[in-house]
Image (tube, helix red, strand yellow):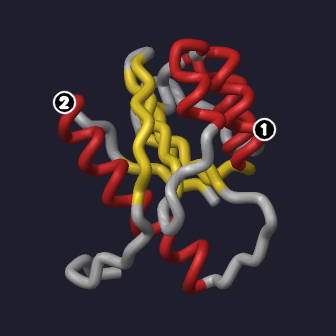
């Protein structure tokens, strides 16, 4: 599952937009679509125009071609264990946090913007105030 959101101008706007979107997507994936899996998910959000993450973008969106000046945010759900191991190798200072499962009832979310990685534990829920 992947999606694209408009680019954000500030780090705070990026975090708020991504976390709200991940909360809803996690709810949809886990409860509305009733995805049954022994593999938990890791949600990853990043700026699509950041070439440092091209291998990850290729894994999240294998068919997508980057358009010139495309500046959107991509959010994807990846298999937890292999994705966390990959990130733990890239960010050894937070490897323990990445390889520890999130608390019960939450999903792990990684937000990446301009080379900074932020890890969050997110509770899936549906935003009933948002129009679909």
Image coordinates for residue 130, horizontal then vertical, percent: 25, 77
Depth check, front residue: 101 or 48 = 101
SS at circle 1 = helix
Q: Quadrant of residue 14?
A: top left
Q: Residues within 10 Å of mark 1 (few under 14, many from 20)?
A: few
The label on residue 82 is: 1
* Residue 66, above or below 24: above
Q: Measure how far apart labels 2 and 1 are at the Cα level.
A: 30 Å
The residue pinned by badge 2 equals 10
Quarter of the image where the C terminus is located: bottom left
In this rendered view, identify the residue nearer to me: 33 or 50.
33
**Front-most of residues 129 and 34:** 34
* Horizontal and vertical percent position of residue 96: 59, 27
From the viewer's perspective, is residue 30 above or below residue 94? below
* Image quadrant where residue 53 sits: top right
Image height of 110 relative to 116, above or below: below
* Residue at the spot 41% in from the left edge and 43% down from the top edge: 120
Where residue 27 sits: x, y (%)? 49, 74
Left/right placement of residue 45 relative to residue 131 reads right
| Image side of residue 6 versus residue 93, left or right | left
Crowding at label 2, few (<14), some or many (≥20) Cα neighbours within 10 Å?
few
């Amino acid at each position: 599952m992947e999606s694209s959101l408009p680019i954000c101008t500030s780090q705070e706007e990026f975090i708020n937009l991504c976390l709200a979107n991940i909360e809803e997507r996690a709810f949809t994936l886990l409860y509305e679509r009733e995805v049954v899996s022994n593999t938990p998910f890791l949600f990853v959000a990043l700026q699509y125009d950041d070439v440092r993450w091209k291998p990850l973008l290729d894994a999240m969106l294998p068919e997508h071609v980057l358009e010139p000046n495309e500046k959107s945010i991509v959010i994807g759900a990846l298999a937890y264990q292999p994705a966390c191991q990959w990130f733990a190798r890239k960010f050894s200072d937070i490897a323990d946090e990445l390889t520890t499962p999130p608390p019960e009832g939450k999903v792990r979310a990684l937000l990446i913007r301009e080379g900074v990685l932020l890890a969050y534990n997110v509770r899936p829920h549906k935003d009933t105030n948002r129009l679909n």
